[in-house]
Image (spheres, helix red, strand yellow):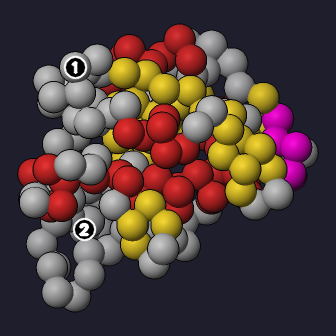
Amino acid sequence: MPSALFSAPSTAVPSPAAGLFQPPAMLLAAGRGERMRPLTDHCPKPLLAVQGRSLLQWHLQALAQAGVPRAVINTGWLGAQIPQRLGSVFAGAGAALPLIYSDEDPSGQGSALETAGGIARALPQLGAVFWLAAGDVFAPDFTFDAAAAAAFAASDQLAHLWLVANPEHHPQGDFGLSEQGL
């Protein structure tokens, strides 16, 4: 899942880049990264580098380019490494993107709250509508489109989910799309 839009309690701000509604974002970064062991034994999976940048930096670059007002990053396994590496502001794409951290596990040893618990803990930092992306997914071409966010915010939908095709070497996934939908 590269991204989704969700409704929750609060507000969002217009995008300075496009003059359109652009909500804040949350990047899920608390998991253990079991399938990437031993790489994740000493590094959170979202900090693993692909093409010279961490997985989180790819998302933050896209968020900054889109004019997203702030990003909340939930942390868990070895979570202290994430703010140590990224700081409080991501200065990419010619825009400063404030970063807020929501710590699921102050011990850093992996007792994460799972996806819903992590989102619930971060809700006060988000808004009525917010982007949600898995921080450990490599999706370099994904854009956080302000027009899509505005259309979603004007609808009565609870969530809007974007999916990407699995690579040829791993065609099985968690979702299937047919003429009837998911």
Residue 154 - label: none
Which of the image's four quarters has the C terminus? bottom left
The percent position of residue 112, horizontal first and vertical second, equals 20, 26
Residue at the bottom extreme, as displayed: 168
The percent position of residue 116, horizontal first and vertical second, equals 28, 25
At 82% across and 35% down in the image, what residue appears? Answer: 14
Task: Tell whether 130 sits left or right of 52.
Answer: right
Task: Tell whether 6 sits left or right of 71.
Answer: left
Nearest the camera: 144 or 42? 42
Using the rendered view, name the quadrant where residue 20 is placed: top right
Q: Looking at numbered disc 2 in the image, what kind of residue is underneath it?
A: Ser
At 49% across and 26% down in the image, what residue appears? Answer: 101
Is residue 40 shown above or below 30?
A: below
The percent position of residue 91, horizontal first and vertical second, equals 73, 50
The residue where tag 2 is placed is 178
Residue 17 lies in magenta, yes or no?
A: yes
Nearest the camera: 110 or 80? 80
Mark 2 or mark 1, which has the lower sequence index?
1
Residue 165 lies in magenta, yes or no?
A: no
Magenta segment: 14-18
Q: What predominant SS class does the magenta segment belong to?
A: loop
Is residue 149 shown above or below 51?
A: above
At 62% across and 33% down in the image, what residue appears? Answer: 88
Task: Tell whether 107 sits left or right of 81.
Answer: left
**How far apart in space, not on screen, are marks 2 and 1 (Cα)?**
43 Å
Which dot, 2 or 1, sits closer to the camera?
Answer: 1
The residue where tag 1 is placed is 107
- Graded by Cα atoms within 10 Å as few (under 14), some (14 to 19) or many (20 or more), the crowding at tag 2 reads few
Residue 72 shows in the view: yes
